[in-house]
Image: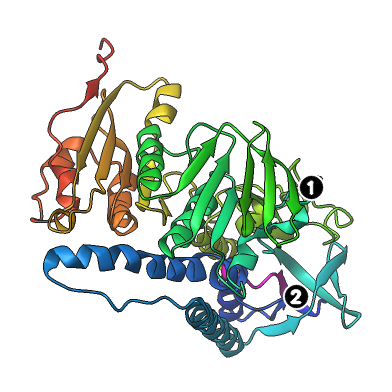
Amino acid sequence: MHDYDLIVIGAGSGGVRAARLAAKTGAKVAIVEQQQVGGTCVLRGCVPKKLLVYASEYSQAFRDAKGFGWTVDWARFDWPTLRDAVQNEVNRLSGLYTQNLNAAGVEIFEDRAVLTDPHTVRLTREGRYLDAKRILIATGGHTYRPEEMPGQEFGITSTDAFLLDDLPQSVVIAGGGYISVEFATIFSGLGVDTTIVYRGERVLRGFDHDIRAHVHADLERTGVRIVTGATIETVTLLPNRRRLATLSNSMRLEADQLLWAVGRAPNTKGLGLEAAGVRLNERGAVVVDAYSRTTVPHISAVGDVTDRINLTPVAIREAMAYVATEFQGQPTAFDHADVASAVFSRPPVGAIGLTEEQARIQGRKLKVFRSVFRPMRHILAGNEQRTLMKLIVDAENDQVLGVHIAGPESPEIIQLAAVAVKAKLTKAQWDATCAVHPTAAEELVLMGEPISHDNEAPA
């Protein structure tokens, strides 16, 4: 006999979905969250970040408006108004998550849970022990900062950026991944002098090389300074409260604020997982099988804490598969192949499937299609931003292996492109689809000639 059929540790997107669905099967479920219900996405990630991106786009929209006959000379930006409106919205969403858990009959504990044995957790604030037949780890991840670096404490992380008292006049952002690029888009769009420091040659490592070059160039075109081939070695707080960053290439950068965007790490420290027999990998992530089971059969894990694909929709689908497997008698493994992703940068990016580099590493023979054009809405405005679209096609069977877009509305377009890639449609099937005109998306079905075509292998 156990106190609960399931205890979920962590009330982010994955944990909340698993708790609600399990409770709806009639299971007795508890969820433990040490901070606020909602997790990274709702409180300090996707949702507030995209709201800030929306705000940052108005500066360009005001400039573009002149080309359409509008005179805009009254615009004034107020950071506290935006900051507070965003926080009000995420708190509203957190409240809805709590309401939904209560409606499903899930018992919520606002505490920190630590495993004391394979079936028991201790609530560290109350000192209470809870026992469960099954335990689900859904604690997500946290921002990383280089704690060994002198002066690193003078920088902030993306979590802190949402709550700044004042908007800085200048900022240095360490890192070149999607968090760095998105916050560079936000800060520069709000009028902040923005510099990225990145150890690589181009931002957005892991994305298709053409997309990386396109975004990198457009950020620079719109005023973001990007220092490549360098890292920050020390940070000093000056008497005027500005930060002085010394780089590995001997450059010295001074700014009002410094933002660490150099990665995230799984939230597993101090959870007692090792004592319960749960194995972690070298990055501290929970090791799981295709069904999200750990090395202890009745303990599972979903979401960023497993470090598989760290995206909110993936955590939710893993949670749904977990409940189907453990509570509905339907063994289900979420397929992590061909998961679409988006970067809310300038320009925004949507991607699904293999990049050109990944496909070539696999030894595939390819047909590569690419189109670069200026969106219609930019022409009258005199806006020089371009859209890039790229299709990666298997030259032997004509299957579309990947779609990569950088341009306005790319994250919206990629959702339906992902359906086609997941269904393994061929380029001929794409081409047989009639275009919707005039749209940017029509270009996906109008690319007739490849820019490169590998010779097909002999039959």
Residue nearest the viewer, comparing 228 with 294: 228
Residue nearest the viewer, comparing 301 with 431: 431
Is residue 8 inside the magenta stretch?
yes
Residue nearest the viewer, comparing 382 with 45: 382
Q: Position of residue 94 (x, y in %)?
A: 57, 81
Q: Which residue is mark 1?
A: 279
Q: Quadrant of the C terminus?
A: top left
- Hey, which residue is sitting farthest front in the picture? 239
Q: Tell me if residue 82 can be seen.
A: yes
How many numbered marks, from 0 up? 2
Using the numbered discs, state the Cα–Cα distance from disc 1 to disc 2 in whole angstroms. Answer: 23 Å
Residue name at image x 31 percent, y 59 percent: 412
Mark 1 or 2: in front is 2
Q: Position of residue 136 (x, y in %)?
A: 70, 65
- Identify the mark nearer the N-term, 1 or 2: 2
Residue name at image x 62 percent, y 87 percent: 105
> What's the residue type where badge 2 is placed?
Gln
Is residue 311 inside the magenta stretch?
no
Looking at the picture, the colour scheme in use is: rainbow
Specify start and end residues of the magenta stretch as a single range: 6-13
- Residue 426's quadrant in the figure? top left
As drawn, 457 above or below 54:
above
Disc 1 secondary structure class: loop
